[in-house]
Image (cartoon, rainbow, N blue to C red):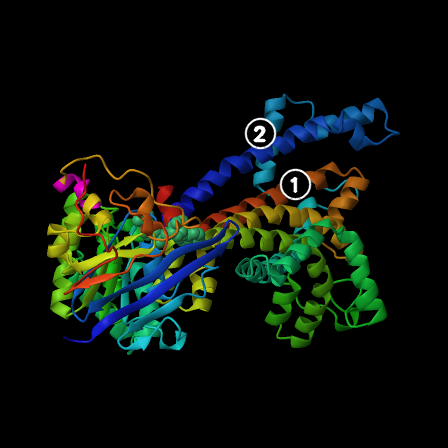
Amino acid sequence: MARYILRRVLLALPALFGLVILTFVLSRVVPGDAAATLAGDAATPAQIADIRARYGLDRPIMEQAAIHVRQVLTGDFGRSIFSGRPVAEEIIQRLPATLELTFVALFLATVIGIPLGLLAALDHNGPIDHLVRLLSVGGLAIASFWLAIMLQLVFSMDLDVLPLRGRMDVALGQPARVTGSMLIDSLLAGRLDMFVDACRHLVLPAVTLALPGLATIARFTRSGVLETLQKDFVLYARAAGYGRVRLAAIYVLRNAVNVTVTQIGLLFGALISGAVAVEAVFDWPGLGTYAVQAILSADYKALLAVTLVVGVVYAVVNVAVDVVQALIDPRVAEEHR
Amino acid sequence: MTRPILQVEGLAVELRGEAGTAQILDDVTFHVPAGGSLGIVGESGCGKSTLLRAILGILPKGAETPRGSILFEGRDILSDRAASARGRIGFVPQDPYLSLNPVFRAGDQILEIMRRHAPGSRRDHRAKIVELFRAVQLPDPEAALAKYPHQFSGGQRQRLLIAAALACDPSLLVADEPTTALDVTTQREILSLLRGLAADRGLALLFVTHDFGVLASVCDRVTVLYAGRVAEGGPTRTVLDAPQHPYTRMLLACHPDRATDLAGIPGTVPAATAQPSGCRFHPRCPIVRGSCAESPPQTVTEGDRVVACPFHAEPILA
Ligand SMILES: Nc1ncnc2c1ncn2[C@@H]1O[C@H](COP(=O)(O)OP(=O)(O)OP(=O)(O)O)[C@@H](O)[C@H]1O
Ligand SMILES: [Mg+2]
């Protein structure tokens, strides 16, 4: 198992290196003359030349690439053109908020989606099945910014049971920053009131973000379970006298979820991009809002850094998916030996 | 005579499907004496597996209302689900490669059966499984508990499934062609293992096969099915040596080991949705009479033999 994990990690590295190179190419291609962009519209040719020298843009391209790689590896993304602050610092500030939101959303989508898919499959063509099918079409069809606003209108404005925006009530202050996750930090600080408030703030954005993922997960689980139910070992288990509930919820499900787990890994990418809209509506101080701001102000350094960070997170999630699959199905790790 | 452990009376199974209602089993009657062994033979599609599914209480969707009765140890397990004999009837499936759940350890899959149907703690159950693994001659029984199905060979998997069938101390072992998926040498080993275990533990055996050689080596009695009905039944030796029903006679004649001619039986087994009237064998029967198409044949009982053909004494002219 340890060897399998190591292999998966090593396999992820070339992809990440490719991403670093890609960001370099993009950074040289997209802005046209990077120095001119940096210097601004009113710059004189002398100023542009000065900037070109200062940023090393006058050196041979291979050397520039080497410098770029070294900078990225040391976590040096340069300074934001917009705020003038180091990009790495800003990202560290914002990344935890996005991770917290996406992980909670993914968690919700998984713990609700898998049982729903299972129930739908067991009730093949019955009422539950139809309901779940409706839900999964709806979940994929509804635009998340619209859903976000609707949820705000109902639960924050009309019913006034959940907060409208932000991560924590201003009156409560904030827990001492350790991980940047409000849930974890408030627990570490021993502040249960803050923890509850953080949860309340998470509900609407996480639900909004989770819905399309939930639909996908339920759909894949449903078809996986339906397929597994046809297998000989299910008939054998029934003949041997397995209990109905345990047979479905443990023995069938574990065979059926591997496809779902793959989907969960892929979903993670969709969730992070979905977070852009959700963060904007709920005023969530995460990477999504940061990226939008960076796009609007043509802050390409910030954008490249965001791309890289999301790429790394994505790679980590996919290694995790591979590991989970090997845990679910012992044959997976052996096949890849 | 001891009371039979399993007594099937007038069993009829119909399967409602899109293509109409299929009569898969009709008026099937036979019994398995306690500690005895009965073989069920018949061509593919004649309803052997369905018969076992009825006994094990796992008939497919659309066949939920069978008629007749299945008495196991004196109680009707067909009509009274509460009297279900799970655990008391051990089941050995046909395909050892597909019948085990690939993502669970061998030990855990057997523990799951015992959890519901065997008394005692999990620790007792583990000890019992190791003991059974030893009895079925699985190498390294302790380690086998923690292995996954793909880490065993086909023959070992069948041993594992036999151990699973014995886990809850059954009094009847039901096996659906348990050796067809295995090579000849392994087949022989598994058969002698089954015979030995049944003898040692006083188990009754209900054994589905289409192989007369296997039948002769395992079962004292045999029931021949044709298109969902019993054609003939009796002690294996007498039926094999002197078959009476024209179907059995022809079937034995085209069996390669004892072939007198290899012509086979003309025609095919009728579809379950379109059973012929009267005797279901009449369209293929060499000694057919006009009356055969009219009503199901009377079953003739002679000593310990039954035959569903009143004209069975007629010679078959080639
Ligand atoms: N789940 C099912 N759905 C529809 N038809 C079925 C089902 N199970 C069995 N049948 C039909 O019932 C009839 C008997 O099938 P069964 O599997 O009992 O035959 P068998 O004697 O076991 O054959 P084989 O020797 O090939 O295993 C066949 O005509 C088959 O098509
Ligand atoms: Mg069969």
**To which residue does mark 1 refer?**
A307
Magenta segment's dominant SS is helix
Mark 1: give few (<14), some (14-19) or many (20+) Cα within 10 Å: some
Q: Is residue B224 above or below residue A194?
A: above
- Judging depth in this view, the residue of A270 and B182 nearest the camera is B182
Residue B19 coordinates in the image, percent (x, y): 51, 49
Q: Amino acid at mark 2?
A: Ala
The part of the chain drawn in magenta is B251-258
Instruction: Return the disc, 1 or 2, that comes first in the chain's sequence.
Output: 2
Q: Is residue B189 left or right of residue A106?
A: left
Q: Secondary structure at mark 1?
A: helix
Can residue A237 be seen here? The reply is yes
Q: Is residue A169 left or right of residue B22?
A: right
Q: Amino acid at mark 1?
A: Thr
Can residue A93 be seen here? The reply is no
Tell me the CA gap for discs 1 and 2.
Answer: 19 Å
Q: Secondary structure at mark 2?
A: helix
**To which residue does mark 2 refer?**
A66
Residue B104 lies in quadrant: bottom left
